[in-house]
Image: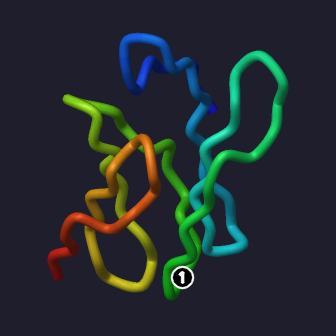
């Protein structure tokens, strides 16, 4: 996991795991803010750019999520 700012007042940690899930955690409390489940393991750390979270999954897709909500913006195969 890496600490990244998702917004001007919003510090989150974004992480992935072999359980097919990307999670956003509050950096101060450790509380889960959202999670997103894919069709396969997410083996590499998500990357943050312009309030979007980007990552690849073993399901064959590259994903883009809104960093604040975890809603899928797009996916590409």
Q: Provide residue 3's location: percent of width, then percent of height.
A: 57, 19
At horizontal 29% and vertical 77% (from top left) the residue drawn is 61
Q: Provide residue 11's location: percent of width, then percent of height.
A: 56, 18
Please tell me which residue lies in front, 10 or 55.
10
At horizontal 50% and vertical 42% (from top left) the residue drawn is 45
Q: Provide residue 66's location: percent of width, then percent of height.
A: 33, 50
At horizontal 62% and vertical 55% (from top left) the residue drawn is 34
Element at badge 1? Answer: loop
User: Could you tell whether 69 is left or right of 40 in the image?
Assistant: left
Please tell me which residue lies in front, 28 or 38.
28
At horizontal 35% and vertical 45% (from top left) the residue drawn is 53
The mark tally for this picture is: 1
The quadrant in which the C terminus is found is: bottom left
Q: Can you say whether 24 is above or below 3 in the image?
A: below
User: Could you tell whether 44 is left or right of 63 in the image?
Assistant: right
Residue position marked by numbered label 1 in the rendering: 40
Q: Can you say whether 49 is above or below 4 in the image?
A: below
Q: Can you say whether 73 is above or below 69 in the image?
A: below
């Amino acid at each position: 996991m890496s600490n990244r700012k998702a917004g001007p007042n919003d510090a989150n940690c974004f992480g992935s795991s072999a359980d097919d899930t990307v999670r956003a955690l509050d950096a101060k409390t450790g509380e889960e803010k959202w999670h997103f489940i894919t069709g396969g393991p997410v083996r590499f750390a998500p990357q943050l750019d312009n309030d979007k979270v980007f990552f690849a999954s073993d399901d064959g897709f590259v994903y883009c999520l809104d960093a604040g909500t975890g809603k899928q913006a797009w996916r590409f195969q």
